[in-house]
Amino acid sequence: MKEKLKPYILPVSLCIAVLVSLVLIVALLVNPARFGSRMHQDKSATLKSEVSSKNRYDIYSPTEIIRTTKSGKQGLLTSETTSLTGELVKNIETYHVESVKEVSRDNQKHFINTLNSDNSLMLNYGSEIPVKLLSKIFDSKVGSNNFNVNRMILPLGDNTHFYLLGDNGYHVYEVTTKKRNLNQLQNILNKKIQSVNVQMRTLNDRPFLFYPNRVKMRNYGYLLAEQSQTAYINRVLGNTTDTSVKHRKKSTTYSSRDQSLNFDNDDNVIYQDYKQNKRERSYANVLNSAYGYANKLGIPLDNARFDSYNPVKNTVTYRTFVEGYPVFNQKRLGTCSFTMGNGGATRYEFSLLSFQIPIPTNAESTTLPSTGTVLNQLSAEGIDMKKVRSITLGYQVVPEKNNKQLITLQPSWFVNYDGSWINYQLIGNGTGKESF
């Protein structure tokens, strides 16, 4: 029987395929809007599942790890094979806090001595963090306090204490715990780790990382990923009937009654929510709102860390980090910012482009001068050193001329001058157009 039916199987299958195709074509012709809407919904759902829902405590995690030896020598720790920050946070999550007390304030000498404690690890945040935001990492006895943290000191020879430091006002808090697992900490440090000679110093009464020697940094090339405008339109505005579109020479804006998305020709995006949301008063709630909106919009945050908060503008900024170093760019690639207005309206600025795949470059590394050399150079050029808030090593985005999907990350020094980051090679030109 099977042998008799075999010659008819292929023709019958082809007929069924043709009939299914005809049905779909008729459905599209009869109601293209519904068919298109279904396609958009499926695409949006798929994209939502692919968008990184990165844990907020990864976003608000330390950006630098510094080890101080028993002899007082300090080194910035990095690793190409393991997430040092992630491993250390897992260790910290096991601590059982018994008490928290402030041991000093407005005492610069005690603050600096604690900062440079021998035989310890120091975890530095990009900007001060409300300790309440760390309540999921620490015991609730820490999270119930109301102070901000810039740094964490983990002694390697004391298994019942660690310290939280706030730069503004030189606050030092001692946290008493039950027995901490120092062996686990040591096991993390025994992994393949690179250490660069550094020193913690102060610049205009602010702690910063000082490199006493020249520094060699790797160059990177990156292939960029690009999200589609349609994905954001579907996710934010959906299939509402009141959406309007305005085309301009260099941008396009999609608007509904209480939201809008503006896309410019450089792949920059501005999202605005005009609803009268409750204005967040506490610093912790503003940071939580910034993260919540990023997730709602589907902004990729895979290599991002909390970078800064501007209390005057009520603006939170996230920045991409590569190998522990911040990335700077005059466009929005590598950064995204959240602003909550006085009336409760919100604004998010970001890029459709994000870092995807590292690729080889012709130049393997760049050697940069020491911190002292850079500061002396700035002073010799007549820069007002009182306006220099900080200085850091980082990467500047250099786009490829013929392919916007390719960029080079070029190592350099960056100076926070009067509130804006500027490449140290350009800070003396007086134009102010090169700030980030």
Image (tube, grey):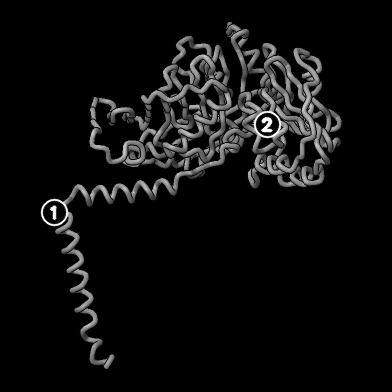
Q: Quadrant of residue 163?
A: top right
Residue placed most toward the observer, 116 or 244: 244
Residue 254 location in percent, x, y?
28, 31
Residue 30: which numbered mark, if any? 1
Q: What residue do we see at 62% from left, 34% from top? A: 61
Q: Quadrant of the N terminus?
A: bottom left
Residue placed most toward the observer, 317 or 27: 27
- Asked if residue 253 lies left or right of residue 405, the reply is left
Q: Earlier in the sequence, mark 2 or mark 1?
A: 1
Q: Quadrant of residue 64?
A: top right
Instruction: Identify the residue under disc 2.
Output: 143
- Asked if residue 92 lies left or right of residue 316, the reply is right
Residue 164 location in percent, x, y?
73, 27
The amino acid sitting under disc 2 is Gly
Q: What residue do we see at 67% from left, 23% from top? A: 146
Q: CA distance from mark 2 to mark 1?
A: 59 Å
Residue placed most toward the observer, 12 or 433: 12
The amino acid sitting under disc 1 is Val
Query: In front: mark 2 or mark 1?
Result: 2
Residue 363 location in percent, x, y?
54, 37
Whether 345 is drawn above or below 24: the answer is above
> Which element type, helix, strand or loop, lies under badge 1?
helix
> Which element type, helix, strand or loop, lies under badge 2?
helix
Residue 84: which numbered mark, if any? none
Residue 137 location in percent, x, y?
67, 38
| Label 1 crowd (10 A; few <14 / some 14-19 / many >=20) | few
Q: What residue do we see at 13% from left, 54% from top? A: 30
